[in-house]
Amino acid sequence: MSCAGELAVRCQGLKKRYGNVVAVDGLDLEVRAGECFGLLGPNGAGKTTTVEILEGLLQPDAGDVQILDMRWGEDDRALRQRLGVQLQETQLAEKLTVEETLRLFRSFFKRGRSLDDVLKLVQLEDKRNAWVSRLSGGQQQRLAVACALVSHPELLFLDEPTTGLDPQSRRQLWDLIVEFKSTGGTVLLTTHYMEEAHRLCDRVAIIDHGQVIALGTPNQLIATLGAEHVVEFALEDGDAVADQWLGQLPGVEEVRREHDVVFLTVSEVHRSVPALLNKLREQNLTLSRLTTHHATLEDVFVALTGRHLRDG
Amino acid sequence: MARRQHPLWELTRARLLEFIREPEAIFWVFVFPVLLALGLGIAFRNRPAESLRIAVQEGPGAVPLAENLDNSPELRARVLPAAVAQNDLRTGKLALVVIPGDSVTFVYDPTRSEGRLARRVVDDAVQRAAGRSDPRATGERHLTEPGSRYIDFLIPGLLGLNLMGSGMWGIGFNIVQARRRRLLKRLLATPMLRSHYLLAYALSRFIFMLAELAALVGFGWLVFDVRVHGSVIDLLMVSAIGALAFSGLGLLAASRARTVEGVSGIMNLIMMPMWIFSGVFFSYANFPDAMQPFIHALPLTPLLDALRSVMTDGAPLVESLHRLAIVGAWGGLSFAAALKIFRWS
């Protein structure tokens, strides 16, 4: 489809405010053709506003947007022919069947897939004649994505496509996205699930307060923590432990507290944990909890903002 | 590549399917007007002329006189004691009391038309029984003016009411719902033409208008023998203009509203004056002259006049052109205004 290095989306200095609330505050983005690009951020970070501006549904207050080498306002219908869009919280007409809904969306596009192909792609073949209102949440969401795929778009926008879905439905949607990408399509995805971003996205921009605060591949972003593991522990006697000596334990890059829980970002668990246990024993302190996990994009977000993605 | 249908047709098809899958909508558009016509048609049917109730006061010769009078098809006569007869006359149960004797006396209230009528009928019967012969033979022929019954007035009224109601509700609700569900916004993200979306509403209204027309006019014809005296094509034209005009108003009512409650309020506000003043159930001539210019400016009034002119009077369409111009102007202006201020997201 497009050669590598070409840009599918490019926006600079994007700004949008609603009254006194600044939703997008000077945001720059570049999405390369053929990649899956993730906008990761908590609710209210400005992800949806950004995507709707890129989709040509909202006017930015300032900034320049280029989509597939075109600008909104030049030839919008020609540009829309090449885009697939799934909006957050769109409810399709309840009393149309799956097939009727797809037929309707298909009719808007000059070229595209056959309904059979799309139904197969989203695994809704046996629901072909079911009313939309009779579908499960996951099926409705797959249909929404199917409506975006009927045209065989070059660029697919997905705004929180898996929010509120059960793990199995989520995985089915992930498969769909991977499948779309494998045929050369570009995806711009928003999510507040770090696992989703990590799994699907070639590159991720972490968004907070309408700005990009970090950008890179998921592994690059995690590497900025300086260590790949997180050790999480709590003591029976809450505040007794002092940060200074924790930071001096072997392999510990960063110390962070949340209420009674202490988070250590460490490069080598096998050195840091025994050292931690020794120190605690010396001081007669008892652990009430100890876990370790691989550092995630969530940890990156927390390290950058001091807040969790889900906190909003 | 799949064969692709025209988007306007697909949009219209989707509207039609959504509508026929809504049982409430089917009831209000097709069943309710027919039930209303049935109820009102029965309540206000034309009754055969009732016979007049009279009494003969007790006395000599009262019984044969009463029998004689009772034989007249227009009279119901009984013999009653004087006191009872006077009382029944006073309370309106009797139209007239006859006091028999050599000279027959009629007691009645001359301010009541029933009394005056009874006096003539009884007098005729008494004179004829006494041997009066009518020197000149007369005959009679009964005439029923076509379209003079209440149901003849009502059916075109309900037709207009239905064109207004389904235009407003059918379009307003669906658009506001699509806006609330963010479906409008989703459609905007496709290359769909906005005009196709709105045009599909007008087209689907046109198709349903044919069905509504057939249901109500067919019902009136089969059950009450209400005929279309003018041309059916003319009736179709008038209905189509009405349906499209009220689609425009429905679109305007729904152009900004974000909630179904909001749009219901707006639509009721628009339709309320027309329910009352435009002459659906009774003639607008009942309202004072000062109100007539206002009443005639409402879109439903000229539409009903045009429907009755074609259906009841059998007049050609040209006689209704000025009325249709008013209806069409309402439709065109509201459609243009709706397009201007329509909120898509």
Image (cartoon, coloured by chain):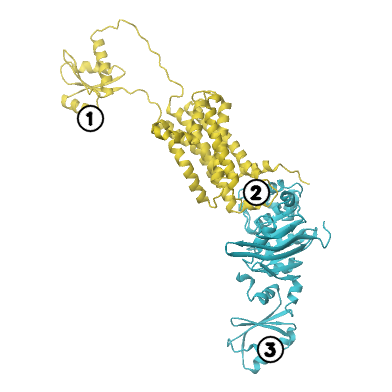
Q: Secondary structure at mark 2?
A: loop
Horizontal and vertical percent position of residue B190: 69, 50
Q: CA distance from mark 2 to mark 1?
A: 69 Å
Horizontal and vertical percent position of residue B247: 56, 40
**Three-letter code, disc 2:** Thr
Shade of chain B as shown in the rendered figure: yellow
Q: CA distance from mark 2 to mark 3?
A: 60 Å
Residue A239 visible (yes or no): yes
The extreme front residue here reads: A62
Q: Secondary structure at mark 3?
A: helix
Compared with residue B252, is residue A181 higher up or lower down, i.e. above or below? below
Q: Which quadrant, please, contains the N terminus of chain A?
A: bottom right
**Nearer-the-camera pick, B145 or B167:** B167
> Which dot, 2 or 3, sits closer to the camera?
3
Residue corresponding to mark 1: B91
Residue corresponding to mark 2: A97
The quarter holding residue A199 reads bottom right
The extreme right residue here reads: A3
Which numbered disc flags the more N-terminal residue, 2 or 3? 2
Horizontal and vertical percent position of residue B297: 48, 35
Residue at 60% in and 39% down:
B202
Q: Chain of mark 1?
A: B
Compared with residue B311, is residue A107 higher up or lower down, i.e. above or below? below
Residue corresponding to mark 3: A276
The quarter holding residue A2 reads bottom right
The extreme top residue here reads: B135
Q: Chain of mark 3?
A: A
Residue at 70% in and 73% down:
A297
For the colour cyan, the matching chain is A
Horizontal and vertical percent position of residue A150: 73, 51
